[in-house]
Amino acid sequence: MPGGRRRWPPHANRSREHHPDARHSGVHHQTACLVALEGDAVVGFVLTRVDPGDGMLPCAVGDLAEFYVVPERRGQGISVALATAAVTWLRERDVWTVRKLICAGAHDEQAFWRSAGFEADMLCLSLYRDA
């Protein structure tokens, strides 16, 4: 990229645990925002968190809460690098299952996550309040 060099995750110094004391809190969970940079410009990010759940399951679940790459940088490997870095970050925290909630009609997004090894195992139904 002219004027800047590319740096993709994982960058330990670009990852930040927003709630480093979450393990002591019971209210907050461990979270991280991993970013993809071109020079100093953020071209993508993933917000991930560890959810210890309610104790009914024997392990923590990882959630890829937000995931975005700027449109003009899609298809260049940034999404794969971010997804890989996020899953690695979660696995390092003993997460067994990683989840990504996707809109039912977002077929391209579903195809991307399936290509990364994710599989459909749940269905989210929503009830909206009448106007």
Image (spheres, rainbow, N blue to C red):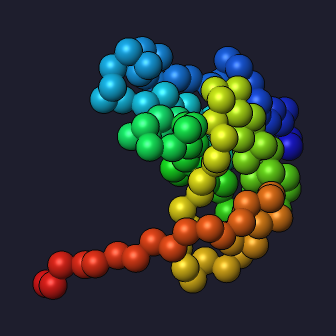
**Number of marks in picture:** 0
Q: Residue at x 76, y 30 (%)?
A: 10
Question: Compared with residue 100, is residue 56 higher up or lower down, i.e. above or below?
Answer: above
Position above or below: 88 against 11: below
Task: Note whether 79 is above or below 30 in the view shown.
Answer: below
The N terminus - image quarter: top right
Question: Where does the image place residue 20, in percent across and percent down from the top left?
Answer: 47, 17
Q: Where is residue 104, by image quadrant?
A: bottom right
Q: Position of residue 100 (x, y in %)?
A: 59, 57
In this rendering, is residue 42 above or below 127?
Answer: above
- In the picture, measured across the screen, residue 15 lies left or right of residue 78, that is left
Could you say where residue 131 lies in the image, as x and y percent from the top left?
A: 13, 84
- Residue 93 falls in which quadrant of the image? top right
Closer to the camera, 64 or 72?
64
Depth check: give the residue in front, 120 or 19.
120
Give me the residue at 78% from left, 43% from top.
Answer: 84
Give the side of residue 131 with respect to residue 57, left or right.
left
Task: Locate residue 73 relative to residue 127 in the image: left or right.
Answer: right
Which residue is depicted at the point 36% across and 29% down? 28
Q: Is residue 104 visible?
A: yes
Q: Residue at x 45, y 72 (%)?
A: 124
Q: Quadrant of residue 41?
A: top right
User: Relative to the observer, which residue lies in front, 23 or 100?
Assistant: 23
Task: Where is residue 87? Give x, y as percent.
Answer: 71, 41
Is any part of residue 3 visible from this angle? Answer: no
Residues 4 and 124: in front is 124
